[in-house]
Image: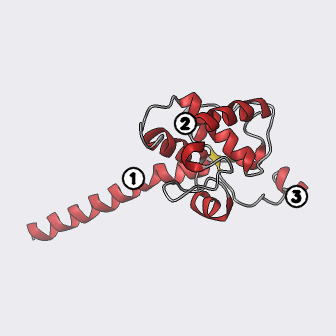
Amino acid sequence: MQARTAIATIIGLAVIGATHSAAPLAQETAQAARSVWDGVYTADQAKRGGEQYSNICARCHGDDLAGSDEATPLTGPAFMANWDGLTVGDLAERIFQTMPQNNPGHLTRQQVADIITHVLSFNGFPPGKTELDPRIEVLKQIRIDANKPAPKSNSESQGK
């Protein structure tokens, strides 16, 4: 009898733990209410990011962001397929932790944000009126959508 109770308790705790650990992920995805199509950076920031990209990233990823044998592309179908549905925060973390390849972790959060704006601009995502914020908690709220979402209908935008 004690063995059954112990097993039931362990199973119950495992279910609670699994549910609890999945909650932050679901919450994080729900919070990614903005999209790269919403104008999340400025043209000036993308220009600044382009200069940093040229100095730091182009040697491996190329001026055209097409990548090389040693570096993945930062544009085109392969790039979009890899990042579609993830967040700008996910991309920022990857860059921040692994780039540049010969000196990972050397870039500041601001440099990473600026470089990302160049990548977004190059990929045709529109600029807006506010600079992309380098804070990871803000970047995690911006979804990378490969395809432009359909505009909301009046009834959707009015909550009907």
> What is the quadrant of the N terminus in the image?
bottom left
**Whether residue 160 can be seen here:** no
Instruction: Tell me whether circle 3 and circle 2 mark residues in contact (CB < 8 Å).
Output: no
Which labelled disc corresponds to residue 137? 2
Q: Is residue 153 left or right of residue 97?
A: right
- Disc 2 crowd, CA 10 A, few/some/many (<14, 14-19, 20+): few
The residue depicted at 62 percent of the width and 53 percent of the height is 74
Q: Is residue 132 left or right of residue 15?
A: right
24 or 61, which is in the foreground? 61
Choose between 128 and 105: the one closer to the eye.
Answer: 105
Residue position for label 3: 153
**x%, y% of residue 77?**
66, 64
Disc 2 marks a residue whose amino acid type is Glu
* Circles 3 and 1 in contact, beta carbons < 8 Å: no
Cα separation between marks 2 and 1:
18 Å
Question: In the visual, does 153 lie left or right of 134?
Answer: right
Residue 150 point in image, percent of width and height? 82, 60
Q: CA distance from mark 3 to mark 1?
A: 35 Å
Residue at the spot x=49%, y=46% of the render? 94
Kind of residue indicated by mark 3:
Ser
Outermost right residue: 154
Residue at screen point 69% across, 56% down: 145
